[in-house]
Amino acid sequence: MKTRKHHHSVREIILVTLAAIVILASNVFFVTIARVHLRSGQDLTEYADSANFVHEVTKAMRGNIYANNGTVIAQDSRTYNIVCILDPSRPAVGDTIAYVKDKEGTAEVLSRLLRMDYDKILDYLNQDVYQTELGYAGRKLSKSVKDEIESYDLPGVEFTNSVQRVYPMGQFASNLIGYAQSDESGSTIGQMGIELFLNSYLTGTDGSRTYQADAHGFVLPGMKETVVSARNGDNVYMTLDPGIQETLEESFRITNSTFDTQRVWGGAMEIATGKVIAWGQTPSFDPNTLENITDYTNTGAQMAYEPGSTMKTFVWAATINEGKYDETMTTDGNSFCFIGDENNNPVRTYNENPIGCIYNAGEKKYGYPDLDHGMIYSLNTVAATLENELITPDIYLDYLKKFGFFSDVDTDGLPESSGILNFTYAYDKMNLSFGQGSTATMLQLFQAYSAIFSDGTMVKPYFIESIRDPYTNEVIYQAHTEQTGNPISEETARHVQKIMYRVVNEDDGTAKYYRIPECDLIAKTGTSEIAINGSYNNQRTITSIMCAMPADNPQVLAYYAFEADYAKDSHYYTEAQTNFFRKIAVSYGFAEGASSMPQPESVETVSISEMPNLINHSLDYAKSSLEKTGASLFVLGDGTSVIRQYPEEGETVATGQRVFLITDTQSFVMPDLTGWTRKDVAGLWAATGFGFQLSGTGKVVSQSVPAGTSVSKGTEIRVVFE
């Protein structure tokens, strides 16, 4: 019985399909032979004489780039331009004309939806041309505006479309992310950074449409048409944390205002996994405008520099790991004068004719400190003692290579510098002990310090978490932690960490001004001279710090450096760095394990929650669900239930974070954006789908639509940051 019914249904489907094919074929037959459109009865003699096949390319959308919580870093935005057909000769479809006949009525609707002067639109529509556009106001319209215009069924009003790459977060790890631009064919191509390295994944496959049209491109229903759908590019998910990254970028601005900086750079990484959660530099650029680009270099990977005293950590680690370290031993902390032996190795001498002498910063003398205080005070003289008297320069160099220096890290396709090793003369070898003469990159420092801050296991830093299919979310590539060596033992790593704790937490430690109330740190500071015209004259220096937190169980490392005119108090004014470190500590919940250090009254307890699904729920339910998160709630629209939310379900929400609930997709009342960050405004943009134009960096200082104004679809909202 079931079988018969099934066969009967199949026959019906086949008959209906055949009928449709016959109708379509008949229609084409009548157009091509009888020159009459079967359904409309339109005489198409003139149309058929001029008909030709047209091949159009349907551009694929480039894949999105996301931060680790789903925040959009880069995406394609399909925009639309209005085209108004004015020539009455455009063939009608049935009883529907295909040109703008009611010019006054059309101008009235478009002026309201586009917020454009009525008379100006009417001037466009009264031209004696086949078709016209409407100037700037009719270009780059969002899909929501296009849909709203189409809902009025205005005859003769049509659209062309284009795709542009937008970066909602603006200047956000820009020298790492890079940018993409359209080429002559209209395809968006990566030009630098991740956009370039992963271009083959991000680039989709264009589709096509082949159809019959008249000389003006008009197509009647039922004409021959072949469509091949475009396939969008794959989506890339990065390891960057938007909140921590934004704080890093803000810290750069603080440093720039405090010191006469040439450049500033820094970042942070999970020690156990290698996930880079922040990475940036200044000068940088806004990829939306590409204005004022002075440097296309990804500083952290491509700029090799003399890192200074942050390299001393490794001579201590090498000496301890070789079993040559006695923490009770004292040594000359005033100077290290030397000659070269037959192998050009430095040998200490107290004779009158050394080939050189090494002094501490400012030539300050420390008497005979123990070895631990050599690191606590960051003494060049003690570092030289370890390298040249307790071990040898060759042993030290072997350790540096085990730590990955002078070789590419080779992560995620990033172009990088491997650094330069100067190790020929006694001076070269001596300078290597305190981080001068030879060069390294921040990327190499991240990898090397992962061993210092862990159990001696070194991991490779990485930025790409996964690459996913845009339709199925299927994982095409998934990152995994990659161990790159064990240059030191766990016992050595713990010993070095113990000394680095004292660097921060003893009152005479060089990193004492970097303490934060949320948790204890371990750290090593650095100040390196920059050679100018081939000589070191202490005029310009690189000030840096490498730290890890929390001290008793390091989970995240952070590095911060800037190049500026020499200032003896460069490790004293640390607001920029501590803001960055505190953001990491709060984001990872390290405050719960803080020591008894008194906390300022201004420190606010921050908790992290998971965003619930509030779609289709009432506002009362939504407000109740969000109450425990401590989020700052913004309800947009006059509806009574939630139809869109930001952040989305499953994303993280921190105390004080702005959360947007949309109850009406057509309009909302503009909030006061003063003081908002790029992330906040990007959230409002994502939630509403309205058009925003963002310029500048920092926090919002002005907005084109005043707070309290009702905003409808099509309004251009310009926001300026400083």
Image (cartoon, grey):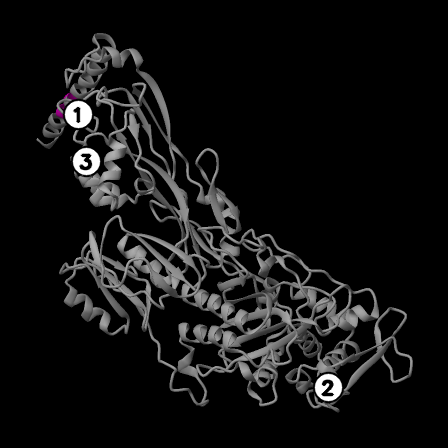
- Magenta span of residues: 11-15
| Contact between labelled residues 1 and 2, with CB atoms less than 8 Å apart | no
Seen at 35% across and 62% down, the residue is: 702
Quadrant where the C terminus lies? bottom left
Q: Is residue 554 visible?
A: no
Q: Is residue 631 visible?
A: yes
- Which secondary structure type mostly characterizes the magenta part of the structure? helix
Badge 2 is on which residue? 364
Number of residues whose C-alpha sits closer than 10 Å to that of mark 1, classed few (under 14), some (14–19) or many (20 or more)? some
Q: Position of residue 444 (x, y in %)?
A: 61, 63
Number of residues whose C-alpha sits closer than 10 Å to that of mark 2, classed few (under 14), some (14–19) or many (20 or more)? few
Amino acid type of disc 3? Thr
Badge 3 is on which residue? 106
- Residue 14 is covered by the magenta coloring: yes
Quadrant where the N terminus lies? top left
| CA distance for labels 2 and 1 | 90 Å
- Residue 301 is covered by the magenta coloring: no
Residue 123 lies, with reference to residue 554, above or below; the image says above
Q: Could you tell me which secondary element the residue under label 2 belongs to?
A: loop
Seen at 35% across and 49% down, the residue is: 473
Amino acid type of disc 1? Ile
Amino acid type of disc 2? Lys
Q: Nearer the viewer, mark 3 or mark 2?
A: 3
Number of residues whose C-alpha sits closer than 10 Å to that of mark 3, classed few (under 14), some (14–19) or many (20 or more)? many
**Is 459 situated left or right of 684 in this image?**
right
Badge 1 is on which residue? 97
Q: Position of residue 647 (x, y in %)?
A: 30, 61
Q: Nearer the viewer, mark 2 or mark 1?
A: 1
Give 15 or 128, whichever is nearer the viewer: 128
Residue 277 lies, with reference to residue 4, above or below; the image says below
Q: Could you tell me which secondary element the residue under label 1 belongs to?
A: loop
| CA distance for labels 3 and 1 | 14 Å
